[in-house]
Image: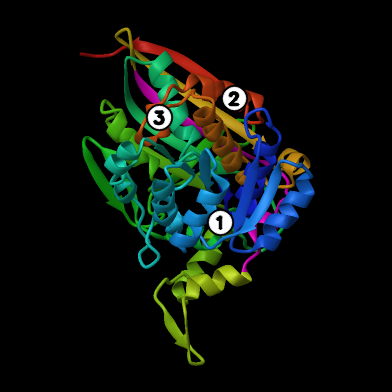
Amino acid sequence: MIIGAGGVGAVVAHKCASVPEVFEDILLASRTKEKCDKIAAAIGKPNLHTAQIDADDVPALTALISEYKPEIVINVALPYQDLHIMDACLATRTNYLDTANYEPRDKAKFEYSWQWAYQDRFKEAGIMAVLGCGFDPGVSGVYTAYAAKHHFDEMHYLDIVDCNAGDHGKAFATNFNPEINIREITQHGRYYENGKWVETEPMEIHKPISYPNIGERESYLLYHEELESLTKNFPTIRRARFWMTFGQKYINVLNVLQEVGMTSIKPIMYEGKEIVPLQFLKAVLPEPSTLGENYKGETSIGCQIRGIKDGKDRTCYIWNNCKHAEAYKEVGAQAVSYTTGVPAMIGAKMVMTGKWGGKGVFNVEEFDPDPFMDDLNRYGLPWNEQIDEALPVEQ
């Protein structure tokens, strides 16, 4: 069962429907059933059905899950709804998977504490929750686990680098949900160093980073949730940072929107009605799922890791490049939706085929990365790696 019919939901539905030997029957559900029906018609597979559901309505969602009886619920709705969907999965003893961690509507903050708090309840129910199984978070964690398993005795420095070098031709647009995207990049940055979190002003730290097949792009330090789980699950990491590229025009427009209050999440009164400026802004910006056609260029997302192996310094870079045009040709979506949706399908496949198992709440890096890495190559996100040996580490 897939909840959410945006750009990512469409990709997840496409990819699940293409693997009927695992996903024998699929239900795509959303607040707006027409969106689900449109996606189902485009895919044209008899194993894909649709339903209307408000994911904030836990009793109704519980009833729908009870009626359909899926092996797993793939949550690609809004991060605000994670806990409601987890509650419904608990009530029905159904496995759960999402691509982004929970954040409250009234505060631009996200962390895993709310979802990690479900550990005992999921364990007692005999089911599992897989958190953050998109690309970043998601593949970035699997890459790190793969590097830890195959290339390092200890990992010391981790940089997750995310570049979208595409051009969609719009004056200003976000590549995923505008409300979530803008909340994410306008809050304070944070990175992990020597056991502590260091906070920065929004977009304060930036530098050019070179991306494969793209070249140098100005990259900005942001906080991203996988830093929290990766530093917890790989305690030898001394420093972990997340970088994302933004063009200067995007930064300029965003600054103006901030200065005039359009990115605020505090409600205001307008003509006798309470509205949230950022939600209004979302309504007038292009819908990310419409950006795929004529989208040129590609994304490049990867992990740059430094540590030691057999007493010697070693660096490892694992990455994927995904072309917008190729993603659109395959599933009618741009590469940002594609790189999030494909890993969600693969994660669900890992659970349903028993490659990933357990009872409780897990982040993706806690599982065996190898079968997931194999499926990335099989289902459209082939990866590359570069390993460099260096001089012995000074004691």
The residue at 55%/50% (across/down) is 67
Can residue 262 be seen from the camera position used here?
no
Query: CA separation, marks 2 and 1?
Result: 36 Å
Helix, strand or loop under label 1? helix
User: How many numbered marks does the figure carry?
Assistant: 3
The residue at 35%/64% (across/down) is 107
Residue 380 at x, y = what percent? 66, 31
Residue 196 at x, y = what percent? 21, 41
The residue at 63%/47% (across/down) is 27
In the image, residue 158 above or below residue 293: above
Q: Any magenta on residue 300?
A: yes
Q: Which residues are magenta?
A: 285-307
Q: Are marks 2 and 1 in contact (CB under 8 Å)?
A: no
Left or right: 20, with 259 as reference point: right
Closer to the chain start, of discs 3 and 2, is 3
Residue 395 at x, y = what percent? 20, 13
Closer to the chain start, of discs 1 and 3, is 1
Q: Which residue is mark 3?
A: 365
- Which residue is at the far front? 67
Q: Any magenta on residue 262?
A: no
Q: Nearer the viewer, mark 1 or mark 3?
A: 3
Helix, strand or loop under label 3? helix
Q: Which amino acid, mark 3? A: Glu
* Snapshot quadrant of residue 322: top right
Closer to the chain start, of discs 2 and 1, is 1
Image disc number at residue 375: 2
Helix, strand or loop under label 2? helix
Q: Which residue is mark 1?
A: 248
Left or right: 55, with 224 as reference point: right
